[in-house]
Amino acid sequence: MDYIKRKIDFEVRIVRPNYNSSTYIETDIVKFISSERVIDSKQFKSSTAMVSYNFGESLASVDSTFALMLTLEEDNVGQTWYDKILEMDLVFISEFGESRFAGYVRSRRYVAKVGSDGKPERRISINGGSLGNLLSSFKLVIDQYLYQGSELAEDAAKQLKEALTQKMGVGQQIAPLFIQIYKSFFALVLKMGETNPSGTGIKTILDNFIDYDSKMSKTLLIQYPLVLSLYQIGENNIWEIWSQMVHPPIGELFGLWNFSTEKYEIVFRQSPFDPDDWKGLTINNIPSIIVTDFDIGTSIDEVFTFYYVTLPGSPYSRNEALGLAVEGYGFTPAMDKEKWKKYGYKSLMIELRYFNKGELETFTGEGGVGSVIARLSKKLQTWYTNNDEFLSGKIEIMTIDNRAWDGKLKNPRIGEKIGFIEGEFYLESTTHAWNYGGPMTTTLDVSRGYNYTAFGNMIGKINNVGSKARTITSKIDKR
């Protein structure tokens, strides 16, 4: 019988930033560790009071979360970790010596209940979000009454408005626009109401940990004349402003903690489903020996037969889409006639926002509006036409210690590929967890399970799934 037995190895470090400083300064609060070490009973700089934790990452939302459960350990004056850990403290979680998550505390709870054995159970619960959650929750209220009378604030507001209403030509890079908006956004944040002109507090954390530049796609270009109209009165956050420019599922925007640089990287790219992009994704081939549970299969919940990219303000708006679907009317949207017979009309429509209507007459002919719409509509069909054959689901594995595999197997990250049952899958979210007395596990949410060539081309569905799955489950049953 093959099996792996490992020691639990984690560290949860909690620090308190100085929110009154214009530079990032932190004070250590505690390190929760997984093994007995020399502990200063007076200072509690290290502790083994952790009884469980979980954290995750997802492509679908930047608002990923974490949760810690602690014992009622007290110091010499009767204080527990409920008293010592505060909201807005930063939390860094490492597994097997590798930093894998960074976030901040949003809530603390004292939890008491009677267990199934009739004994009382008392715990301290610490919950929060990732640094991406902090980025998306940092609000800017754009209201002229908050910055009128201040020339600095008025100038900053003007710069932000110009950044959010500028015109961009076809063929220009999109990434610089994201970066310019970020800089202009926070320039106004600091000057509005003159409440924080020196940039203290949360801004210093974002400056220290957020990398909004290095993972922005430098190859993704503007496809049509663009004029932004994102400036609006009311609450805004930088993530909402960015997200309006991504046009999912054509593009992706997500956050990823980089363990080597200890930065939260903002990733903006085209969804990696073209062969060259798929080929270039990092892949981890999951050996059956570390699989503890899985649930995969097919579904028709997201089957599409009609693919159309609309461009409001042009002749190719949403209202015209179904009329154009009739052959003989010039442009024809991408359709799957064979699947239409089986599933009926199921549309995937994507609206490309901020088309510059003033350039409609010049943006015609070869390479013009119709060409862009046709090309992107066909791209969507190519990417998603096999949705009824793709395998998706969850795979639970033993949390990976990169050192134990000599670099051949690493901690899986969202936006990468997973090799499993002789196919390749796209990794959409991960959840890491540990409970006292149990193993460290990682749950992988996967999609697009299929057979691909070495060049990233789709070649067919994964056959004999039951037989391949049975081989893995038989090994799980014997452990």
Image: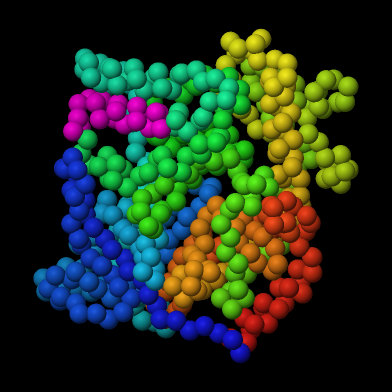
Can residue 32 be seen? yes
**Taking 228 as reference, is 82 above or below it?**
below
Is 465 in front, or is 216?
216
Answer left or right for 331 relative to 281.
right
Q: What's drawn in magenta, residue-wise?
A: 179-198
- In which quadrant of the rendered image does the C terminus lie? bottom right
Q: Pinpoint residue 238: horizontal percent, then vertical percent.
A: 40, 34
Can residue 299 be seen? no
- Residue at 62 percent across and 69 percent down: it is 294
Q: Pinpoint residue 153: horizontal percent, then vertical percent.
A: 25, 21
Is 149 in front, or is 470?
470
- In which quadrant of the rendered image does the N terminus lie? bottom right
- Residue at 65 percent across and 47 percent down: it is 276
Q: Pinpoint residue 388: horizontal percent, then vertical percent.
A: 76, 52
- Residue at 50 percent across and 66 percent down: it is 410
**Taking 179 as reference, is 476 above or below it?**
below
Is residue 271 on the magenta stretch? Answer: no
